[in-house]
Amino acid sequence: MKNTSKVLGIAVIIAAIALSALSMTGCTEPEPDPVVESITVTPPTTTTYIVGDTLDTTGMVVTANYDDGSTMTVTDYTTDFDSTTGGTKTVTVTYGGFSDTFTVIIIAPYIITYNNTLSPYTVTKDGTSLGNNTTLQNAIDAIRTNAAGANCVIKFDDGTNANGLVVGDDYLSFRNISSGTWGAVTLTGKITANRASSYDGTIYINSGISVTSKAWIENANTDISARAVYNNGTLNIIGGTIIGSYGIYNYSGTVNISGGTISISEANYTYGSAVYNSSSGTINITGGTITSTITSTTTNTSVYNSSSGTINISGGTITAESGYAVRNTGTGGIINITGGTITASTGYAVYTLTNSTTNITGGTITGRRYPSS
């Protein structure tokens, strides 16, 4: 008969040795994986949209919070963002069965269409007609009165016409008069004019009015003074396309360019400027593409400071096939270049006369300079 006490004693000793060895090697019972118990959402930078826009997640951060106190940024989340209708809306972000929210504003645009009748310019909003108008300016004034100083979006055409809104020699003027004042205006869609006057363009912006454009704005006239946008207020270019003998003519106003494409019309081969700064105007270029691709003349300029105003270039792409990419000739005019890419193929990348000042502390400049140093 075996000595069971002795066997048990040996087993206890072996177990103790094993436990001691495990302890010495640092092996312990594995901890359970942390479990998500909530999420936190930092809203995106952009929280105001136009009907039909998609969610811009730039600046948006979704953080998963775990039961052990740890956190982790996650990207495989879902949202219920919906811009099919206007209004203030709550966006729900979901991850791992948990959710958090933020608020956005969806703006329904005023849509101007042309219907070729005696009162051809129709204004609609949210599918409801606000009436027909005999001129484009009547339509704009009707929107201003209806908006009553609030921020609004104006869309040229409803998207069914590939050419957008073609207005001949007409033009659109933003001004504040007694029948109503503008809030901040955003332009979308496409509008093309054939306007020759040197005092306005396809779009004319008066002092004290702020217009932000994501639209295609074109002046198809071949006249030397044909302007796509004449600005004497505040103009923000964040996207879209602008084309004219002068793409943007800035007179004593402020232009901020962060996106979009601005160019000189190929139809005008005599003289032109994609972005022209007159009088005491200020232009700030942080992005976008500004270009002159015309090779048949040496007088075209992509960015031109002609008077005592100031142009600040810290980003964007400015190019010229011939002529000048950046030109500064105004008495007391100042151009500050701290960034961006400036290129000239056969003309001058940067050209400065002695009565003006160009300060270059950054950016990438390829091509000739005047003075050469």
Image (cartoon, helix red, strand yellow):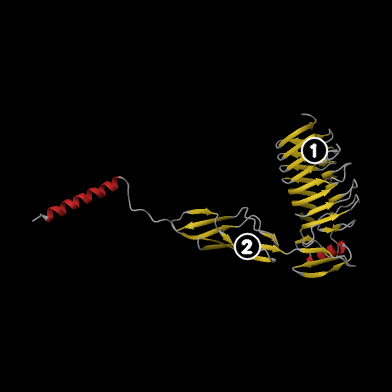
| Residue, disc 1 | 321
246 relative to 146, above or below: above
**Contact? badges 1 and 2 (CB < 8 Å):** no
Badge count: 2
In this picture, residue 46 sits left or right of residue 35:
right
In this picture, residue 225 sits left or right of residue 21:
right
Label 1 element class: loop
| Residue, disc 2 | 81
Residue 205: tell me if it is visible.
no
Residue 328: tell me if it is visible.
yes
Q: Quadrant where the N terminus lies?
A: bottom left
The image quarter in which residue 100 lies: bottom right
Q: Nearer the viewer, residue 329 or 118?
A: 118
Q: Position of residue 354 (x, y in %)?
A: 84, 32
Q: Position of residue 64 (x, y in %)?
A: 51, 57
Q: Position of residue 120 (x, y in %)?
A: 87, 65
Q: In the image, what residue occupies the spot 84% across and 43% down?
A: 273
12 relative to 315, above or below: below
Q: Position of residue 93 (x, y in %)?
A: 57, 61
